[in-house]
Amino acid sequence: MTDNNSPPGSPKVNPDHNSEANPLPKDDSSLENIVRRFQDSMSLAKKHKFWETQPVGQFKDAGDTSLPEGPIEPPTPLSEVKQEPYNLPSPYEWTTCDMDSEETCNEVYNLLKNNYVEDDENMFRFNYSKEFLRWALRPPGYYKSWHIGVRAKTSKKLVAFITGVPARIRVRDEVVKMAEINFLCVHKKLRSKRLAPVMIKEVTRRVHLENIWQAAYTAGVVLPTPITTCQYWHRSLNPKKLIDVGFSRLGPRMTMSRTIKLYKLPDQPATPGFRKMELRDVPAVTRLLRNYLSQFVVSPDFDENDVEHWLLPTEDVVDSYLVESPKTHDITDFCSFYTLPSSILGNQNYSILKAAYSYYNVSTKTPLLQLMNDALIVAKKKDFDVFNALDVMHNESFLKELKFGPGDGQLHYYLYNYRIRNALRTSELGLVLL
Ligand code: MYA
């Protein structure tokens, strides 16, 4: 059985069609349909032995509007939080991964490089860089104790990993302290042994010890119960390579040279005042972003420290650009993307697919379409092969026109111990997790 963890950003798509020739599949991704499919399969056998015991929206409650929004369980007194780690099977032991250590960071990098998320066809696997992992795991106020590894006792080899980082997430009018959980990975040889539930319980325990009772996470698999289900879209920047490695196919009645022409971009961004974000821009970008994100049902509650960490450009990790009005010098627009390459598995000619992922974008004066076209231009200049974007926030307004093609994998968003009455539309979501 495959993991069915279509990696965001993996190549499950054929972006080399124009959107007319490649219409979206019939919408069978609504929460109701997902729940129905699941209930059908559950009546045959499928139960979530672990997830049924957790304070998450359960499938049986989907659509029950009598249940209140907010925490599912109240916090317990800290003195009642289990003080010792959960038991692992006896050959394994817990380790806290110090991401400041070059050696540990290397071990984490290699575990993920060889065992993390693959697309359904096992052609590509995420290859998060070490610098990226350090950035993703050390935001303001991070806890080392939330970077959790499992080692084989005898060899000391790192065989599993899960992480949390703290975040303030706003849900409607409430700002809730949460953990963002990511990088859950069990070595391929240790799969299906129920290690993942123990790791999830252990990270939960360590989050509780910091008096935090909610979490946000995404997964390619359907679990109880998504708050929304997003789709990835892919914009070819280097169509020849994407076709050569099987990421995309030549569209019908298309030649390679016509395809290359189709995706060609200007050499320079078009918007006057478009430039890279700098440290001095942090206050203005924070204001712009806070104001913009307030319109979504779920979004991060970024302050200046968060913006400095998450959005100030870091080489080969995150890129941010803004528009400074040449007249008033006001910062009016902003766009950003992060760098997440994938290993190309088993190709003679290429080993790495360089992908940019749309992060947070704000337009107040420059049309979003023009802003994102400028983002594509700078990404192309930086030698990315593909630019990926989810259909969150206002992204749908530019995807088709800028020649993004729909991917075939889905990304489900979840909250732990927080109920939302109705599933959100993807355009109501203002949160991008890495
Ligand atoms: S998403 C990325 C996940 N990683 C990968 O896809 C990498 C490749 N795959 C693997 O490494 C393994 O297949 C993993 C499962 C580790 C995923 N999220 O140990 P098992 C449930 C949550 O026998 P394995 C990311 O990092 C599954 O439904 N649960 O399975 C966010 C079943 O439970 P149930 C998952 O294949 C992570 C049980 O695990 C996932 O060996 C958010 C089977 O365990 C998944 N992606 O290992 C974690 N996949 O019987 C939740 C499978 O009930 C955080 N399962 O169906 C929750 C909040 C915690 C903090 C709370 C604080 C307050």
Image: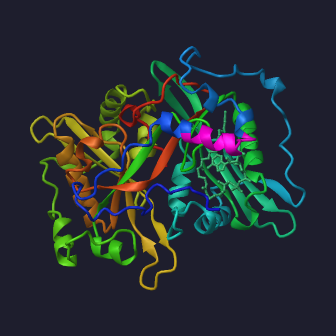
Q: Please provide percent x and percent y for residue 78.
A: 78, 24
Seen in the image, is 72 located left or right of residue 333? right
Residue appearing at x 19%, y 50% in the figure: 401
Residue appearing at x 29%, y 70% in the figure: 238
Task: Specify how the rendered protein is coloured.
Answer: rainbow
Q: Please provide percent x and percent y for residue 94.
A: 80, 53
Work out whether residue 370 or residue 251 is closer to the camera in this orientation and state it: 251
The image quarter in which residue 414 lies: top right
Q: Which residues are magenta?
A: 37-50
Residue appearing at x 21%, y 47% in the figure: 371
Can the viewer see residue 122? yes
Q: State whether residue 206 is above or below residue 158.
A: above
Can the viewer see residue 417? no
In magenta segment, residue 46: yes
Residue appearing at x 74%, y 63% in the figure: 158
Seen in the image, is 373 located left or right of residue 153? left
Q: Please provide percent x and percent y for residue 140.
A: 54, 40
Q: State whether residue 280 is above or below residue 402.
A: above
